[in-house]
Amino acid sequence: MNKRFKHALIPAYQRLATLRGRARVRRRDDKPIAFILLVPDYGNIGDLAIGVAQHAFLEKLLPGYEVISIPLAETYDFLRSLRKNSRPGDLIFLVGGGSTGDLYPRAHFGRTFIVRYLRNLPIISFPQSVIYSTAEARRVFGGREQRAFRSHPRLRLFAREQSSLQILREVHDEHVGYAPDIVLSFTAERTSLRRESALVVLRNDAERLLTDSDSAAVREVVESLGIPIVSQDHEIDSRVLDKASPREVVNEMLDRYWGAKIVITDRLHGMIFAAVTGTPCVVLANTNHKISGTYDAWLRDRCPYIVFATERDRLSIEEAVVRATEAARPGSERPVLDFRAFERVVLEYAIPSQRARDGAV
């Protein structure tokens, strides 16, 4: 089955899955609810961290709300109930990350369908990166997103770096905000007092830019440090989640960052985990703008212990390791970033709805 035909079938599946949905919203009390949809439930630890951070962020910001995270696999099962049984004050949130565009079609189709289906409810998207692989993909996927986004009267989108902000403003006019990746709001509790290893976190998927020779250069550099090497990608077997919660999985990965003297990574959330744990880090580019854009926007001037290596030869990586480790200070803490633009929009949507619900003028 070719990709275009497969994509043509997705809307029919979405309508059928929604029509057959039997899940019901169960309120524990009279509080309004903040629903987070399409929450990652698969074996990507960076995406799991987004889900954990989103939930914690809203619980802190909206103490008068119940926060419910609905996993990706269950989202369609809940949509009928959300449209039928929602109350004034309820809010819908879409997952943040890097899944706007054509790189991850499942998320793209989910987001556009929800925006159309829940037109009666306010929707806010956590900060996203927008990635189109080709000009044709931008025409097809961007056109579909534009039609869906502009059909919703109370939709607010957020970009997490400048390239995506520009694209989203072209797609959705002025209704686009700017905020850091939500995992940068995450508070990571220190679990290890000693940093002893070199942690290598390199991807092996469609976003990989490194060649085999680049990877060999990384290996040579870390081996020359004379400390234990831990190689650990962020992809895990999804069956791990049958026995451990996303928070537990994320915390276990963060333990590895706390125990590292240096991190070398080409993953966005590898860089972000290094930031929130104060771990020296050398960052390598991937195939798109989300890593370099996030680094330039939020970390370059705040985290001197994180160094973006523009070249990938051994000498350049060695120099970046030296710069990162020399810039680190005992007790380095996560950068304090400004989420007020995102908070203002959430409260703008929540407070008037809550007042209406309580009968206030």
Image: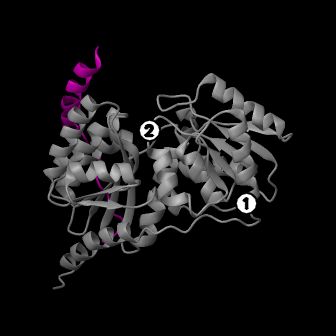
Residue kind at label 1, given as amino acid type: Ala
Question: Residue 89: percent from the left, percent from the top?
Answer: 24, 69
Asked if residue 329 is positioned above or below residue 291 in the image, the reply reads below
Q: Residues within 10 Å of mark 2 (few under 14, many from 20)?
A: some
Secondary element at tag 2: loop
Q: Which residues are magenta?
A: 1-30
Q: Is there any visible trace of residue 31 in the rendered image?
A: no
In front of the other: 111 or 355: 111
Question: Residue 248: percent from the left, percent from the top?
Answer: 60, 50
| Residue at x 71%, y 30% (from the top left corner) | 217
Of callouts 2 and 1, which one flags the residue occurring earlier in the amino acid sequence?
2
Residue 339, quarter of picture: bottom left
Q: Residues within 10 Å of mark 1 (few under 14, many from 20)?
A: some
Q: Is there any visible trace of residue 181 in the rendered image?
A: yes
Question: Is 51 left, or right, of 260 in this rendering?
Answer: left
Asked if residue 229 is positioned above or below residue 262 in the image, the reply reads above
Q: Is residue 19 magenta?
A: yes
Secondary element at tag 1: loop
Question: Residue 65: percent from the left, percent from the top?
Answer: 36, 70
Residue kind at label 2, given as amino acid type: Asn
In front of the other: 155 or 180: 180
For the C terminus, the quadrant is: bottom left
Q: List the residue tagged with mark 1.
A: 328
Question: Is 14 left, or right, of 70 in this rendering?
Answer: left
Residues at marks 2 and 1, CA–CA distance in whole angstroms: 28 Å
Asked if residue 234 is positioned above or below residue 24 in the image, the reply reads above
Q: List the residue tagged with mark 2.
A: 288
Q: Residue furthest bottom?
A: 361
In front of the other: 140 or 52: 140
